[in-house]
């Protein structure tokens, strides 16, 4: 259950009638009347609801909402249902949803292996308005179920999971500080190196937390492979596979990703510490004749 924007309440669950009228798993209640939410309702249980930015978001083990294929997560804008990409993998059990003021939608649950076809680190993912990505945290120690998600006033995301007792931990993206001496935005080259041996490791994202620019990947970095992300030429190239531009996910800030003058905090999130990243750049300086120049570092 969640409150809408005009004082009404969205109610979801496992029911087919409300107020003596046929409604499939979701209704909108305002004052004394239950109203339909679209035509046909939802074809499976609604486990969690939230409302933000004029839209209600529903999650659960369903595949359609108002006749639209949604696969576990759907958004209602007051007049129609829409999918968030291709939704969750078949058999997923989304259990909780929360939406932020900037339009980001977090979904957590059980048996969630992909979202929008993108492999997940654990049982939760976020929608950035155009694509799904895994957050830069890995909660491990067994099979984890995400039961609850909530945002605090300071912007922190609280995660309630099935992890209990000892032996559980959380892994987050590695952070480093880059001191950029240019006076104009810098467009670095990022060189990504795979493990020395063994299986490949997934690269999930590269984030400049200072500028909030993010690049999301659906990419395995193989042993002894070198991948170059050129943020000036906007290319992604492997020394063994050639161009792999398709591994950059929709919704990434590829054309906007930059270093700002001064300190930049960079996060690289991969499935293991055997994947490393090195950054080089040209200090973008602006001369009196308005010509940009600099030397590659």
Image (cartoon, rainbow, N blue to C red):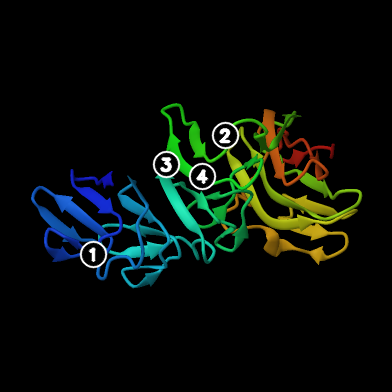
Q: Are marks 2 and 1 in contact (CB under 8 Å)?
A: no
- Tag of residue 146: 4
Looking at the rendered structure, the number of numbered marks drawn on it comes to 4
Distance between mark 2 and mark 3 Cα atoms: 27 Å
Check disc 2 and report its element: helix, strand or loop. loop
Q: Are marks 3 and 1 in contact (CB under 8 Å)?
A: no
Q: Residue at x 88, y 63 (%)?
A: 240
Q: Which one is earlier in the sequence, the residue at label 1 or at label 4?
A: 1
Check disc 1 and report its element: helix, strand or loop. loop
Query: Is 99 or 33 nearer to us in this picture?
Result: 33
- Mark 2 or mark 1, whichever is nearer to me: 2
Check disc 3 and report its element: helix, strand or loop. loop
- Where's residue 192, x and y in %? 81, 48
Q: Which one is earlier in the sequence, the residue at label 4 or at label 3?
A: 3
Residue where numbered disc 1 is placed: 16
Q: Residue at x 54, y 63 (%)?
A: 89
- Where's residue 222, x and y in %? 83, 56
- Where's residue 293, x and y in %? 78, 39
Considering only vertical position in the picture, is 246 above or below 8? below
Distance between mark 4 and mark 2 Cα atoms: 12 Å
Q: Which one is earlier in the sequence, the residue at label 2 or at label 3?
A: 3
How many C-alpha atoms fall within 10 Å of the one at disc 1: few (<14), some, or many (≥20)? some
Residue where numbered disc 2 is placed: 164
- Tag of residue 100: 3
Q: Is residue 168 visible?
A: yes
């Amino acid at each position: 259950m969640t409150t809408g924007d005009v004082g009404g309440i969205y109610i979801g669950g496992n029911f087919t009638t409300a107020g003596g009228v046929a409604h499939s798993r979701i209704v909108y209640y305002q004052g004394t009347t239950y109203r339909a939410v679209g035509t046909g309702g939802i074809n499976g249980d609604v486990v969690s609801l939230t409302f933000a930015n004029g839209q209600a978001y529903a999650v659960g083990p369903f595949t359609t909402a108002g006749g639209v294929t949604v696969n576990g997560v759907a958004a209602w804008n007051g007049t129609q249902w829409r999918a968030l990409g291709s939704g969750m993998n078949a058999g997923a059990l989304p259990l909780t949803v929360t939406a932020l003021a900037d339009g980001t939608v977090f979904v957590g649950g059980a048996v969630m292996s992909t979202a929008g076809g993108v492999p997940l680190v654990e049982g939760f993912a976020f929608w950035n308005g155009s694509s799904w990505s895994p957050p830069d945290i890995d909660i491990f120690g067994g099979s984890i179920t995400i039961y609850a998600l909530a945002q605090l006033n300071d912007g922190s995301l609280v995660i309630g999971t099935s992890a209990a007792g000892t032996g559980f931990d959380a892994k987050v993206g590695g952070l480093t500080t880059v001191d950029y001496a240019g006076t104009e935005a810098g467009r670095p080259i990022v060189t990504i190196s795979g493990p020395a041996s063994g299986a490949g490791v997934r690269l999930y994202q590269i984030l400049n937390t200072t500028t909030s620019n993010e690049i999301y990947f659906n990419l395995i970095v193989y042993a002894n492979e070198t991948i170059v992300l050129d943020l000036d030429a906007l290319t992604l190239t492997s020394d063994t596979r050639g161009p792999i531009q398709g591994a950059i996910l929709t919704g990434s800030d590829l054309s906007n990703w930059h270093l700002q003058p001064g300190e930049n905090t960079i996060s690289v999130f991969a499935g293991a510490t055997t994947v490393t990243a090195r950054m080089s750049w040209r200090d973008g300086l602006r001369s009196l004749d308005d010509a940009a120049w600099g030397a590659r570092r």
